[in-house]
C-alpha cells in the first residue's frame, strides 16, 4: 500500500471502528437478555464476527488471520514466550476507561491530548500524525457516535476512549507501537483511567511484549 494512502486507510478504519462500537453496544444489550458471551471485538462463543474493524482481503497487510488465531495470540499464558509463528493482528485496539463515575470531561481530554501531541482530525477523532501529516494511529470516544465535539467541551463526557492502529500499513510499526503504548500510559495517568485490552481485561506487560515481538 502506498504511503500516501495511509491517512485514508486509517481514517476509514476509524469510521468502521466507530460503527463497530455501536454494534458492540447493541450486542452487549442482547447478551444480558440471551446470556451469550460477546467479547469486545464482537465475537461470540460460536466464533461469528459481527463487526470486523478492517478487511485484509486484497491488501498488503498479509494473509487474513482467523478468529482462532487472534484468540490464541491474546490468550497465551503470561509466563510463556511469544511464538515467532504468530503475526500481528490487523488492528491493535485497546481502551482507556475512566475511573471516575462521570467519565472523562471534554476540556480535560482536549488538554491531555494536547500534552501528548494528539491532533483533532477531520473525522472528529484525535490522531497521531507523522512528519508527513499521515496518520499513525487514532483515538475515538466510546460514547455516542465515537467522535469528539469541536465546541462546548465542558458539557461533553465519555466513559472511555478507544485507541487503534493498523500495523500492516506502517513503515515503522514497532517504533509507532512504542509511542502508542507510551501515549496510552501517559493519558491513563493524566486522565485517571485504566487501560484494558480487547477482552476488557487490564493490559499486561506480557500482552504488550507479545504484540511488540510480532511487529
Image (cartoon, helix red, strand yellow):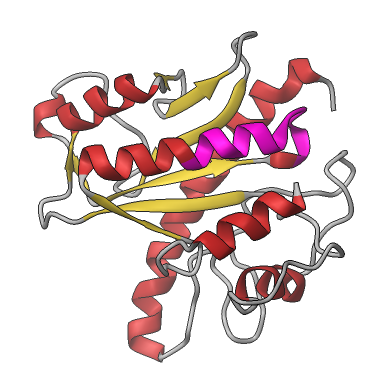
Q: Nearer the viewer, residue 45 or 115?
A: 115
Q: Nearer the viewer, residue 182 or 114?
A: 182
Within the magenta stretch, is there residue 135? no
Q: Nearer the viewer, residue 43 or 70?
A: 70
Rendered location of residue 176, percent (x, y): 62, 32
Q: How many marks?
A: 0
Rendered location of residue 114, percent (x, y): 31, 19
Within the magenta stretch, is there residue 175? yes
> Principal SS element in the magenta part?
helix
**Quarter residue 69 falls in:** bottom right
| Residue found 77% across the figure and 27% down from its top | 171
Q: Nearer the viewer, residue 25 or 213?
A: 213
| Residue found 64% across the figure and 86% down from its top | 46
**Looking at the picture, does residue 29 appear above or below residue 106?**
below
In the picture as drawn, the residue positioned furthest to the bottom comes out as 35
Lateral position of residue 52 relative to residue 34, left or right:
right
Lateral position of residue 90 relative to residue 121, left or right:
right
**Looking at the picture, does residue 86 appear above or below residue 125?**
below
Lateral position of residue 104 relative to residue 63, left or right:
left
If the image is split into quadrants, where does the N terminus sit? top right
| Residue found 44% across the figure and 54% down from its top | 21
**Looking at the picture, does residue 92 appear above or below residue 179?**
below
| Residue found 40% across the figure and 65% down from its top | 202
Rendered location of residue 99, percent (x, y): 18, 56
- Numbered range of the magenta stretch: 168-181
**Looking at the picture, does residue 165 appear above or below residue 154?**
below
Amino acid at each position: 500500500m502506498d504511503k500516501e494512502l495511509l491517512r485514508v486507510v486509517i481514517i476509514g478504519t476509524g469510521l468502521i471502528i466507530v460503527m463497530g462500537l455501536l454494534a458492540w453496544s447493541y450486542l452487549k444489550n442482547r447478551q444480558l437478555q440471551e446470556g451469550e458471551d460477546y467479547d469486545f471485538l464482537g465475537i461470540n462463543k460460536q466464533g461469528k464476527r459481527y463487526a470486523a474493524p478492517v478487511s485484509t482481503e486484497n491488501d498488503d497487510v498479509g494473509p487474513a488471520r482467523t478468529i482462532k488465531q487472534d484468540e490464541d495470540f491474546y490468550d497465551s499464558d503470561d509466563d510463556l514466550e511469544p511464538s515467532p509463528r504468530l503475526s500481528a493482528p490487523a488492528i491493535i485496539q485497546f481502551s482507556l476507561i475512566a475511573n471516575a463515575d462521570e467519565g472523562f470531561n471534554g476540556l480535560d481530554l482536549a488538554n491531555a491530548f494536547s500534552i501528548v501531541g494528539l491532533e483533532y482530525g477531520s473525522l472528529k477523532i484525535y490522531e497521531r500524525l507523522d512528519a508527513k501529516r499521515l496518520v499513525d494511529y487514532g483515538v475515538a470516544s466510546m460514547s455516542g457516535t465515537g467522535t469528539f465535539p469541536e465546541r462546548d467541551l465542558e458539557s461533553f463526557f465519555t466513559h472511555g476512549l478507544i485507541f487503534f492502529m493498523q500495523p500492516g500499513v506502517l513503515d515503522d510499526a514497532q517504533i509507532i507501537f512504542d509511542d502508542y503504548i507510551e501515549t496510552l500510559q501517559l493519558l491513563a495517568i493524566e486522565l485517571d483511567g485504566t487501560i484494558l485490552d480487547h477482552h476488557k481485561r487490564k493490559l499486561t506487560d506480557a500482552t504488550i511484549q507479545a504484540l511488540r515481538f510480532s511487529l
